[in-house]
Image (cartoon, rainbow, N blue to C red):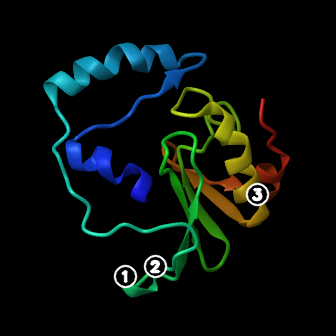
Amino acid sequence: HPADARALSLGQSPLGTTHRHGFLMRLALPVVGALWPLEATPPDVEIGDGESLERFGLDACVLHTPGHTPGHTCLLLEGGVAFAGDLVARHRGPKLQDLLATDWAQLGPSLARLQAAHPAEVYTGHQSRPIPGPALQQLRPR
């Protein structure tokens, strides 16, 4: 997404602020970054909200869901599958992620946008099992 392109080009990953156990990542990430720095990677393509990925061979579209990062996006695939990245989490049950965000106030509206798409199942960024669509619909911002 264009909102994250500059950071990617500079080899940066904005951490934002932490809640709950996110402070552990806040402590660990500078060490990890020093050992394995991010490479500056200018994006080949910038894709915005609502754009189709058909030109890349995917029957999917982009849903801009800022909060975790300014350009965080979800991918909505034909057939009802969604890839939600770090918008939602499945650790100890489905929930709106609550560890790291660049803008906490945007997470609730971003969740509502994903829910409005009514995916049948949602894959998160850090779990292999999907969240069933009805469970996603039950989530509420805290």
Q: Nearer the viewer, residue 124 or 115?
A: 115
Q: Which residue is mark 2?
A: 53
The residue at 66%/40% (across/down) is 107
Cβ–Cβ under 8 Å for marks 3 and 2: no
In this rendering, the answer to whether 68 lies above or below 116 is above
Q: Earlier in the sequence, mark 3 or mark 2?
A: 2
Q: SS of the residue at dot 3?
A: helix
Q: SS of the residue at dot 1?
A: helix
Q: Is 70 left or right of 31, judged from the image as shown? A: right
Task: Please name the amino acid that badge 2 sits on.
Answer: Leu
Measured from the top left, where is residue 62 in percent x and y? Answer: 54, 68
Q: SS of the residue at dot 2?
A: loop
Q: Tell me the CA gap for discs 3 and 2.
A: 20 Å
Measured from the top left, where is residue 84 in percent x and y? Answer: 57, 54
Cβ–Cβ under 8 Å for marks 2 and 1: yes
Q: Which residue is mark 3?
A: 115
Task: Please name the amino acid that badge 3 sits on.
Answer: Gln
Which label was assigned to residue 56?
Answer: 1
Q: Tell me the CA gap for discs 3 and 1.
A: 25 Å
Measured from the top left, where is residue 87 in percent x and y? Answer: 59, 45
Could you classify mark 3 by the number of other residues whose Cα lies within 10 Å: few (under 14), some (14-19), or many (20 or more)?
some
Measured from the top left, where is residue 136 in percent x and y? Answer: 76, 51
Q: Earlier in the sequence, mark 3 or mark 1?
A: 1
Residue 36, quarter of the rendered image: top left
Quadrant position of the C terminus in the picture = top right
The residue at 58%/34% (across/down) is 103
Which label was assigned to residue 20?
Answer: none
The residue at 68%/34% (across/down) is 105
